[in-house]
Image (spheres, rainbow, N blue to C red):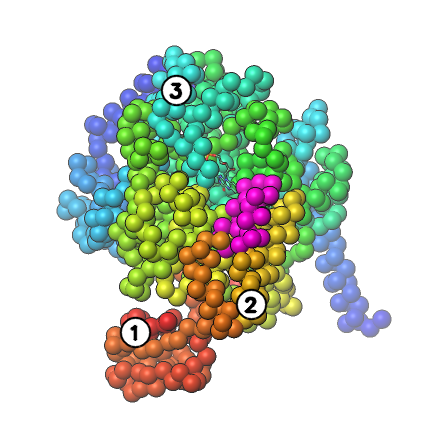
């Protein structure tokens, strides 16, 4: 194999290795969190009661809930994996697909609907070439929605990586997107 | 903080907090730092004031990270409380204005340039649930105690019987603010009567109704009022453990609750043997995960148990069989926030506010096409018009309002001709809507009622848990009919079909979601039927027609914004829109800073 190709391959390999170790580190962190909840001696109902809490933590660590992670949690809590998946799929907050580097969540609550979030969404979709619910080809943005963030007085509202922008107009979209590389 | 082991120790602590204030009264600068304030730029304003204060070294002035006062339209807002003077509110405050303010207060008794709010905004209001929001530091338990907080809990633990507490709450006439309006004292009485232990108390902080944000405001601005009320409720019904179920979309509320719980535990106001009374109570926060149906109490209970948030048929009511099959009392945030004032000022005081059937106040969240968006707490029986026009300031474009939507996805649209209706649970019900959580979405002339109904049906289809057929399938069919009408393919017979199907869903759905989800369709059909008929006749919603009015100063801004160059007119001359070329995009209206574009 040619030198350049080999170098790239080596780079790719190290990238994969670091990713793997960072995933392992995340699992370790998750395990430590589960440990801290003190599950020893709890019955199934008692272990189930912390499931949603653990899923929140896992999503915080991984950015989404890969199948492997769901299986891991199911084993840790001794709950059937179908039960874990049933909960994950019920709640909008839990993601079963990875997100882009930045997540744009539009508020699709009523106040924002009445105040014109629709036009803002159209503008973002056009500028990122991405549809609501999808991730842009370059992995830069994922477009999602939330049902009211409780900042209705600032409608229309969107959040980028959790930061709230209020009274957004279609004209401001370009500048907001430029803040996130 | 050291633990207060007895009621006497608490009384001494509270006295010390108050004495400190009496001997060295402070001028306080409250910066509104709820989610909405922070998003409007309150953070840098706070920093600027704090830096200026540190530089000036004036110990008589204190800057406070407070919650929201409800004047969200003017954020960032700052309030100044000079001892012995009425509070002065400033709006649209910049960091520079913040620094200037500190300098002003060093020489003048009051800040200059206050926000000129119409008297009505405050005069019509009576702040009970919101009493502390914006006027204390929610992360300091001393601030809450200074305003009388935890005094009632201490008094109760010092020898009041649980039955007496329940009798007081019952006599006050307080009804649940989460939507259904069930008498709170009765709910507590049923729970007290339930034999089995353990029992649980749950605070419903799910606030799923889009457009409502009063619970967030209480949690972010006055979390201890909820904790004290839950502890009181625990004592009254005989529960030793509680849960606060808070939606994950409210990270700041969760943080403030965590801080508050830690402080209460440290002072011994939560935990074992509270103030030496032998009564033990503790609580924890449970996070929601973005499901509207989880606001419904049986679904919420399943969610706390770690299951899918599907509702179950009532009875059995949670008071008999709730969390893990045990007696569970679910109360809304705003309901709980009324408990401390009721205990302090008495049941008769509360009962005298509002109307004979609905005692007390209700917090409304004003949003949509209204000038003064924000929160308003008014006595029950205040008319819709007073809230929308005198407090809300009417529409943004100055034209008469068209309708208001109350009760969110479970509620209905009330037309302007009914705005003189006094607000009570029953009166709103008679208009085909509900009180709900108190979200008021105000609609101007431009809003299409068919689109609003379509919006809510999309919401309900999305949020239906799918367990019962009427809700899962029925709502979808309603949605499809509306979709058809909007696409211009509706038929006149679609309208009675919508009504028939809507009523069947209401009668047959399993839980409150399905039993109310057709309301937005049924109420708009009832009050705005002609819009549906026009939509069917005209092949869809008519696009708005934009025209230029006499306010035009001829600045050409709209003409530059128009994507099809259909706006003509010389500089400084009134412009004209060529209707034959207009694509109805509304870019001109958005761009115009003089309100010179009308749309019909
Ligand atoms: C679909 C649905 C959603 C609800 N959402 C909420 C909510 O977000 N917050 C709330 O306090 N109550 C909500 N409720 C009402 C609760 O079921 C329950 O009646 C209330 O929490 C009881 O507290 P209260 O008596 O203090 O009002 C909802 C009900 C239904 C049917
Ligand atoms: S509706 Fe968008 S923040 Fe409430």
Which is in the foreground here, disc 3 or disc 1?
Answer: 3
**What count of labels does the image hold?**
3
Q: Is residue B124 left or right of residue B304?
A: left
Q: Label 1 to label 2, Cα distance in Å?
A: 35 Å
Give above or below for B165 relative to B542. above
Instruction: Give the crowd class for mark 2: few <14, some 14-19, many >=20 residues within 10 Å.
Output: many
The answer to whether residue A150 is magenta is no
Rendering quarter of residue B542: bottom left
Instruction: Give the crowd class for mark 3: few <14, some 14-19, many >=20 residues within 10 Å.
Output: some
N-terminal of the pair, mark 3 or mark 1, is 3
Q: Which residue is mark 2?
A: B490
Q: Residue at x 56, y 29 (%)?
A: B317
The answer to whether residue B505 is magenta is yes
Rendering quarter of residue B378: top left
Q: Secondary structure at mark 1?
A: loop
Q: Which is more toward the observer, A154 or B66?
A: A154
Q: Which mark is residue B596?
A: 1
């Amino acid at each position: 194999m040619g030198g350049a190709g080999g170098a790239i391959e080596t780079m790719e390999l190290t990238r994969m290795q670091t990713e793997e170790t960072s995933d392992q580190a995340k699992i370790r962190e998750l395990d430590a969190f589960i440990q801290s909840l003190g599950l020893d001696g709890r019955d199934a109902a008692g272990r189930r009661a912390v499931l949603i809490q653990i899923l929140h933590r896992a999503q915080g660590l991984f950015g989404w809930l890969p199948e492997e992670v769901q299986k891991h949690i199911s084993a840790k809590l001794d709950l059937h994996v179908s039960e874990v998946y049933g909960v994950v799929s019920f709640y909008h907050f839990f993601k079963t697909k990875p997100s882009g580097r930045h997540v744009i969540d539009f508020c699709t609550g009523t106040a924002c609907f009445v105040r014109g979030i629709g036009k803002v969404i159209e503008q973002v979709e056009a500028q990122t070439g991405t549809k609501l619910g999808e991730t842009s080809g370059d992995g830069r943005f994922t477009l999602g929605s939330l049902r009211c963030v409780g900042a209705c007085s600032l409608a229309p509202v969107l959040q980028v990586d959790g930061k709230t922008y209020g009274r957004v107009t279609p004209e401001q979209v370009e500048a907001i997107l430029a803040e996130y590389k | 903080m050291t633990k207060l082991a007895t009621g006497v120790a608490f009384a001494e602590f509270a006295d010390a907090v108050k004495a400190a204030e009496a001997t060295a009264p402070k001028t306080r600068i409250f910066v509104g730092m709820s989610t909405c304030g922070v998003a409007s730029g309150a953070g840098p304003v706070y920093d600027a004031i704090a830096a200026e204060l540190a530089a000036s070294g004036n110990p008589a002035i204190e800057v406070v990270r407070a919650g929201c006062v409800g004047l969200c339209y003017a954020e960032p807002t700052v309030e100044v409380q000079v001892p012995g003077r009425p509070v002065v509110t400033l709006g649209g405050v910049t960091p520079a204005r913040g620094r200037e303010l500190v300098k002003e207060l060093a020489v003048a008794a009051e800040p200059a340039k206050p926000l000129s709010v119409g008297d009505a905004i405050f005069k019509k209001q009576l702040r009970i649930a919101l009493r502390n929001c914006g006027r204390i530091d929610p992360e300091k338990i001393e601030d809450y105690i200074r305003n009388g907080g935890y005094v009632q809990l201490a008094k109760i633990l010092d020898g009041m019987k649980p039955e007496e507490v329940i009798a007081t709450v019952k006599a006050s006439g307080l009804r649940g603010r989460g939507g259904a309006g069930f008498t709170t004292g009765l709910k507590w009485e049923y729970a007290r009567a339930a034999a089995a232990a353990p029992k649980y108390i749950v605070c419903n902080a799910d606030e799923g109704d889009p457009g409502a944000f009063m619970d967030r405001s209480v949690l972010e601005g006055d979390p201890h009022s909820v904790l004290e009320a839950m502890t009181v409720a625990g004592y009254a019904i005989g529960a030793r453990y509680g849960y606060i179920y808070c939606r994950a979309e409210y990270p700041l509320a969760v943080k403030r609750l965590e801080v508050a719980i830690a402080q209460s535990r440290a002072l011994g106001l939560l935990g074992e043997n509270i103030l030496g009374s032998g009564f033990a109570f503790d609580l924890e926060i449970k996070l929601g995960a973005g499901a509207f149906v989880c606001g419904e109490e049986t679904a919420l209970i399943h969610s706390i148990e770690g299951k899918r948030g599907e509702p179950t048929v009532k009875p059995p009511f949670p008071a008999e069989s709730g969390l893990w099959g045990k007696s569970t009392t679910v109360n809304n945030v705003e309901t709980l926030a009324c408990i401390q004032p009721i205990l302090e000022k008495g049941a008769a005081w509360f009962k005298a506010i509002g109307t004979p059937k609905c005692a007390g106040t209700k917090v409304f969240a004003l949003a949509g096409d209204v000038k003064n968006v924000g929160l308003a707490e008014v006595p029950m029986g205040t008319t819709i018009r007073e809230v929308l026009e005198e407090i809300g300031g009417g529409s943004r474009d100055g034209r008469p309002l068209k309708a208001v939507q109350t009760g969110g996805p479970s509620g209905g649209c009330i037309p302007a001709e009914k705005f003189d209706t006094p607000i009570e649970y029953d009166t709103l019900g008679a208009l085909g809507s509900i009180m709900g959580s108190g979200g008021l979405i105000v609609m101007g002339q431009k809003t299409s009622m068919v689109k609003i109904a379509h919006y809510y049906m999309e919401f309900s289809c999305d949020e239906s848990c799918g367990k019962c057929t009427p809700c899962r399938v029925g709502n979808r069919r309603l949605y499809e009919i509306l979709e058809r009408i909007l696409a211009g393919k509706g038929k006149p017979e679609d309208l009675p079909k919508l009504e028939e199907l809507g009523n069947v869903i209401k009668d047959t759905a399993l839980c409150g979601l399905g039993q109310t989800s057709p309301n937005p369709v049924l109420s708009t059909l009832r009050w705005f039927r002609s819009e549906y008929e026009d939509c069917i006749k005209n092949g869809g919603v008519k696009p708005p027609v934009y025209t230029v009015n006499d306010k035009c100063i001829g600045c050409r801004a709209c003409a530059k914004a128009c994507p099809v160059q259909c706006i003509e007119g010389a500089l400084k001359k009134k412009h004209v829109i060529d209707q034959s070329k207009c694509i109805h995009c509304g870019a001109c209206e958005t761009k115009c800073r003089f309100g010179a574009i009308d749309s019909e």
